[in-house]
C-alpha cells in the first residue's frame, strides 16, 4: 500500500475497488484486502471487494468493506473462474458500478 501511495490515491475518491481470490475469515487477518479496507474506512471511502468467491458467513463490514461480491455468483468452479477471470471480473465490476448509480 505504501509502494503505490494508496492514501494519496484515495484522496477524494468516490469508491475503492479491490480484489481477493477468496474472501474469508483469513482475508481479514492481515492480508492486503484488510489493509486496503481499513485505509478506506479511515478516509471515509467506500470499499468494494470483487473476489473469486465470498464466504457469506464472515462479517466483512467490520473490516471496512462496504460490499463484497463473488465474480461469478459463487456458481462456477475455481478452475473455470481462473480460466475466465478477465471476463468475469470485468462483468462483475460493470454490474457493481451500474448498481451503485451516479455519484453526486
Image: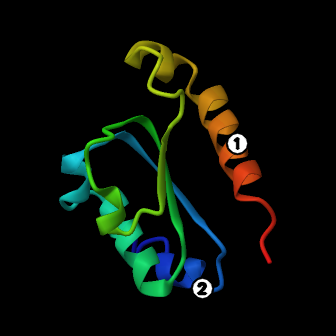
Which residue is painted at 77% across and 59% down in the image? 101
Mark closest to the chain's N terminus, 2 or 1? 2
Residue 71 appears anywhere in the view: yes
Q: Picture coordinates of residue 42 (x, y %)?
A: 41, 85
* Position of residue 93 in the picture relative to residue 44 (left or right): right
Q: Label 1: state its secondary structure.
A: helix
**Quadrant housing the C terminus:** bottom right
Q: Residue at (51%, 28%) from the top-left corner?
A: 73
Q: Position of residue 59 (x, y in %)?
A: 28, 56
Residue located at (44% from left, 26% from top): 74
Q: Quadrant of residue 16?
A: bottom right
Is 46 situated left or right of 98 in this image?
Answer: left
State whether residue 88 is above or below residue 37: above
Measuring from the top left, give residue 29's x and y in whole percent.
18, 59
**Residue beneath disc 2:** 11
Asked whether disc 2 touches disc 1, contact meaning CB atoms under 8 Å apart, the reply is no
Above or below — where is 70 with respect to 96?
A: above
Amino acid at each position: 500500500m505504501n509502494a503505490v501511495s494508496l492514501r494519496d490515491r484515495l484522496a477524494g475518491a468516490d469508491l475503492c475497488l479491490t480484489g481477493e481470490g477468496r474472501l474469508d475469515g483469513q482475508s481479514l487477518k492481515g492480508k492486503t484486502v484488510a489493509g486496503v479496507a481499513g485505509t478506506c474506512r479511515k478516509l471515509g471511502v467506500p470499499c468494494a471487494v470483487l473476489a473469486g468467491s465470498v464466504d457469506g458467513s464472515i462479517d466483512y463490514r467490520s473490516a471496512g468493506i462496504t460490499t463484497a461480491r463473488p465474480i461469478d455468483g459463487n456458481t462456477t468452479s475455481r478452475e473455470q473462474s481462473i480460466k475466465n477471470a478477465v471476463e468475469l471480473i470485468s462483468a462483475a465490476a460493470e454490474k457493481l458500478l451500474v448498481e451503485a448509480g451516479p455519484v453526486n
